[in-house]
Amino acid sequence: MAEKITIGELHLSGCTGCLVTLADNYEGLFKLLDDYADLVYALTLVDVRHVPEMDVCLVEGSCCLNDKISVEELKEAREKSKVLVAYGGCAAYGNITRFCRGGQWNQPGHEAFVPISEVVDVDLYIPSCPPCPQQVRNVAVMAFLLLRGNEEQKNLATAYLTPLMQLAQRGNEACGCDLMYDVINQGLCMGCGTCAGTCPVRAITMEYGKPNVNRDLCIKCGACYSQCPRSWFNFDVMNNYEGIMDAIKGAMQ
Amino acid sequence: MDVLGNYKSAISARSTDKDITKKSQDGGIITTLFAYALEEGIIDGAIVAGPGDEPWKPEPVVATTKAELLAAAGTRYTISPNLYLIKEATRSYGLDRVGIVGTPCQMQAVRKAQLYPIGMRDVDDKIALALGIYCMENLSYQALEAIVEDHCNQKMESVKKMDIGKGKFTVYTERGAVSQMPLKLIHKYVQPGCNVCLDYVANLADISSGSVGSPDGWSTVFVRSMKGNAVWDGAIAAGLFETKPMDQVKPGLDLVTKLATEKITKNQKNVDARKTFGLKADGTAKGLRNPYESP
Ligand SMILES: Cc1cc2nc3c(=O)[nH]c(=O)nc-3n(C[C@H](O)[C@H](O)[C@H](O)COP(=O)(O)OP(=O)(O)OC[C@H]3O[C@@H](n4cnc5c(N)ncnc54)[C@H](O)[C@@H]3O)c2cc1C
Ligand code: SF4
Ligand code: SF4
Ligand code: SF4
């Protein structure tokens, strides 16, 4: 077994659902920690007070511009980690915190919440609210292969992670409307229903085979767009689904 | 990758269950396999295109009995967003082993949901059987209505079966009338999303099936994955299918290959043409999104 990678979770303005998601891998989390990754920083899970050096930093939550400590910790995490991940809808797209306008106990002055890419460069996105335990697991295994694997494993991990890195390049705004703008308006939707099936708040219904977004319900988590097979689809990876799934399963056994 | 995808075997087959072949589109492959998988506990339920609230408008449903599978048998040439239920099936329905049928694009969505379960919590290892149906193109419900009612001159509610084959779209009515229209007139009705589709025979399914290549009433079956292989062998051992080797049926695999190649070549051209769809002020090309390159 190659040397483990180091992973941390930086907690900003999120609900801790992302952190819980990590733990939702149950025994899978222990397997990850036993064989692939040392958790070097995480609220409640690791007793470390200052942001350490790490290979992968998962950032949960959006960044409150009025909270000096949040801004500083985020910048520090950027400097000290090789790969910075926007972990969950809030970090990637602002999610529900996009609707915050201050005046809340016990920090009425905190009103400006932005996706972390408005403050630092982000390498990779894991959208959705909450993100899925299996997606975090897959990224953790692939990050291990990327940083510690042989040539072939590095290539696979690169191919796998590329679209998630491209999502980070695409920008920091996403909501159900993206299906309209970037899929339907582009003549790409074929009515599979994935978007409606994935939405955590059931903001999407399928009307005559095409998605209809209730914009009042949408929390801007970005799950529908990133899960849609017509937002991106990499044949190299998906055509080898059986081998890759077996490999991930094998790695977790 | 080959235009027919990876597969372990290709067989011409027909269900031995008369209840099924009476209602199924072709050889009853899909309904028979799901009924078998239900019986054997390989799946707890299957997402199929059930009857909707308007004639010939499918509605995705989770079928947990053979009766429900039978009610959903046959082809509806219009969109049934089957992936809509994929996470729900593991939640409200509490299924641990989910079956799902779908067009090639829907099989792509299934595999993406498994490899990149971004908003698909606890779905990846619960997909127990993904069955694909070949697909050249699909139609919106309104397009299907226009074809049946305007071109074929039949009422939607009086239609018993619709079929595509030998260059024609055919409608059979309850009262025995048969109306046809040439398939080439359908192209303007095709949903635009199908024009960038690069899969004909559901390359990513565990098992995929369609009519093309086999005689009427029979289906051409590709057994693709390890899981598909085990299920197929089990169903054959249980005597659920009559089979013939592919090289002994007419028109055979060559026609499948020909149609797959035609579809993929034409649609790859469409994908490429999107790169230079528009024009910028400086005379260079302005492109549309390519979903196969980046988000
Ligand atoms: C839009 C479309 C285009 C097709 N084009 C071709 C083609 O070019 N060449 C070819 O050989 N075959 C094509 N088929 C497949 C073919 O019509 C049959 O579905 C297939 O042969 C299965 O028949 P069967 O008797 O094995 O299945 P059955 O036992 O009849 O079961 C069919 C299953 O498909 C499901 N289903 C029906 N309609 C849809 C839908 N719209 N979307 C998702 N699931 C659905 C049903 O619920 C059922 O479970 C197409 C199917 C569709 C839906
Ligand atoms: S997931 Fe994408 S392709 Fe599928 S119905 Fe939604 S917008 Fe259309
Ligand atoms: S429509 Fe649903 S899935 Fe899409 S961004 Fe909004 S809340 Fe998220
Ligand atoms: S042609 Fe392709 S995109 Fe269109 S319905 Fe069939 S499989 Fe889906």
Image: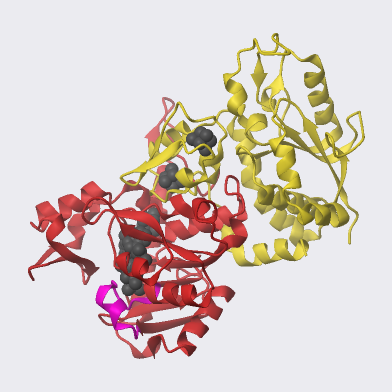
Relative to B144, residue A119 above or below: above
Residue situated in front as seen by the camera: B17 or B2: B17
Side of A176 where A27 appears, left or right: right
Chain shaded red: B
Quadrant assignment for the N terminus of chain A: bottom right
Residue B157 image point, x, y percent: 15, 57
Chain shaded yellow: A
Relative to A132, residue B152 above or below: below
Q: Is residue B25 magenta?
A: yes
Residue A172 image point, x, y percent: 60, 28
Q: Where is residue B280, by image quadrant?
A: top left
The reply to whether residue B295 is in sight is: no
Q: Residue at x 29, y 55 (%)?
A: B78
Give the residues drawn in magenta, as a range. Answer: B15-30
Residue B85 image point, x, y percent: 46, 52
Relative to A60, residue A149 above or below: below
Side of A209 where A155 appears, left or right: right
